[in-house]
Image (spheres, rainbow, N blue to C red):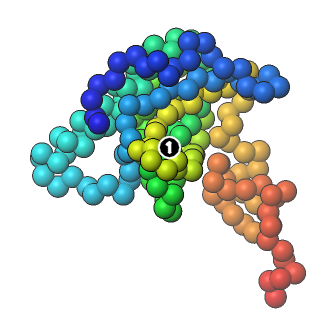
């Protein structure tokens, strides 16, 4: 399950052009069934730390090999979407799977797809959970999307805080005034 992958026949030989001229994208099927999770117990012993490190290293190496095999060119800006079809349809919190996204993005950067994974080159995206298929053990794949033709840093917002409700978080976590659903009349 944590072995080193070789080139996979599922990797498209050429990038896929999305509908209506959408950005180029590449699907990279990972050879794992279960992603890393932020809910995994913290490694207490030295052996547990080494085992966790081996798992992280396997995901990073798999992304590296698959990105090279897919022939992804050097991109100015990109995003990576983690797709997971779990074996069952129970409730899951997608933010826990960022523990898988980070080593995969690092492996893709190691493959020379981009100079770094800073906001200048990489736009973070939330993992996607797909419905389970009965009898299928699960599947994990990455979708690398070329955002080179999209100008600007998409992680920044024009308005750093909302003037209606005072939300000062800004960035990708906050919202702008035109997105605010807070109604002052309700607050008396």
Q: Outermost residue toward the left?
A: 46
Residue 25 % position (x, y): 63, 24
The reply, left or right, for residue 23 in relation to residue 13 is right
Secondary structure under the numbered disc 1 in the rendered image: strand
Name above or below for residue 187 compared with residue 118. Answer: below
Count neighbours of disc 1 (C-alpha within 10 A) and say few if under 14, some if 14 to 19, many if 20 or more: many
Residue 148 sits above or below residue 44 on the image: above
- Residue drawn at 42 percent across, 26 percent down: 63
Quadrant (top left, top right, bottom left, bottom right) of the N terminus: top left
Looking at the image, how many numbered discs can be counted on the residues?
1
- Residue 35: % across, % down: 39, 44
| Above-or-below relation of 187 to 135 | below
Left or right side of 126 for 7: left
Left or right of residue 94, residue 107 in this image: left
Residue at figure coordinates x 73%, y 56% from the top left: 175
Identify which residue is drawn at 46% across, 39% down: 139
As drawn, the residue found furthest toward the right would be: 185
Residue 174 shows in the view: yes
If the image is split into quadrants, where does the C terminus sit?
Answer: bottom right
Judge whether residue 72 can be spotted in this image. Answer: no
Using the rendered view, name the quadrant where residue 6 is placed. Answer: top left
Percent x, y of residue 114: 52, 19
- Residue farthest front in this picture: 135
| Residue at left offset 82%, top offset 25% | 20
Q: Position of residue 178 (x, y in %)?
A: 85, 56
Question: Observer-nearest residue: 156 or 72?
Answer: 72
From the image, tell me which residue sits under label 1: 84
Answer above or below: position of 175 versus 122. below
Residue 43 lies left or right of residue 151; in this view the side is: left
């Amino acid at each position: 399950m944590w072995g080193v992958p070789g080139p996979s026949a599922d990797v498209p030989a050429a990038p896929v052009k999305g509908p209506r001229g959408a950005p180029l994208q590449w699907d990279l099927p990972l050879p794992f069934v279960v992603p890393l999770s932020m809910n995994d117990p913290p490694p207490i012993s030295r052996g547990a730390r080494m085992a966790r490190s081996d798992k992280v290293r396997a995901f990073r190496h798999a992304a590296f090999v698959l990105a090279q095999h897919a022939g992804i060119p050097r991109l100015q800006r990109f995003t990576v979407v983690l797709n997971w079809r779990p074996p069952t349809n129970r409730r899951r919190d997608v933010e826990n799977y960022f523990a898988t996204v980070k080593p995969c993005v690092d492996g893709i950067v190691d493959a020379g797809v981009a100079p770094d994974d800073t906001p200048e080159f990489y736009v973070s995206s939330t993992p996607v959970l797909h419905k389970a298929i009965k009898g299928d053990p699960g599947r994990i794949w990455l979708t690398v999307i070329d955002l080179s033709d999209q100008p600007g840093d998409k992680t920044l917002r024009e308005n750093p805080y909302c003037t209606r409700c005072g939300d000062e978080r800004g960035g990708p976590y906050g919202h702008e005034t035109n997105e605010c659903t807070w109604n002052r009349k309700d607050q008396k």
